[in-house]
Amino acid sequence: MSLNEVWEAASASPFQPVVSKDGQFSVGFSLLLLALIFTGLFGLNRSFLSLASLGVPASLLFGFGAVFMICAVGVYV
């Protein structure tokens, strides 16, 4: 199958994002709020177990929440 054939076949099924443009703000805000809660809980008990159960998910939630918020509100220069 050539690249041109793949390109033509893909035109029949356009990309549909999981989170719509209207829902990105609420998803981003809730992810950032959960990151804040997890970070606070991690600060109360800093052990190896809480690092795995609270610290890593908090950093992932913050990263994805920040990206969703940037996509929701836009970046204007």
Image: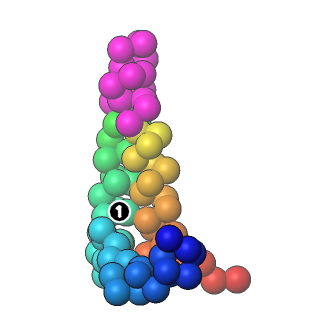
Image quarter hosting the C terminus: bottom right
- 37 to 15, vertically: above or below: above
Residue range highlighted in magenta: 40-57
Residue under label 1: 29
Residue 23, picture quadrant: bottom left
Residue 13: image x %, image y %? 33, 82
Q: Residues within 10 Å of mark 1 (few under 14, many from 20)?
A: some
Q: Which type of secondary structure does the marked residue at label 1 adopt?
A: helix
- Which color scheme is applied? rainbow
Q: Is residue 60 left or right of residue 49?
A: right
Outermost residue toward the top? 48
Which kind of residue does numbered mark 1 sit on?
Phe
Q: Percent position (x, y) of residue 62?
A: 45, 49
**For residue 53, which quarter of the picture?**
top left
Q: How many discs appear?
A: 1
Q: How would you classify the magenta stretch by its main secondary structure?
A: helix
Furthest toward the front, the residue is 1
Q: Residue 75 versus residue 39: which sits nearer the camera?
A: 75
Q: Is residue 34 above or below residue 4?
A: above
Point 49% across, 62% down: residue:
67
Q: Can I make out residue 36 in this image? A: no
Instruction: Using the rendered view, name the quadrant where residue 40 is placed.
Output: top left
Indicate whether 14 appears above or below 33: below
Residue 19 seen anywhere in this rendered image of the structure: yes
Residue 24 place in picture, x, y as percent:
35, 72
Find out whether residue 47 is within the magenta segment: yes
Which residue is located at x 30 percent, y 58 percent?
Answer: 30
Residue found at x 34% / y 73%: 17
User: Residue drawn 35% across and 29% down?
Assistant: 54
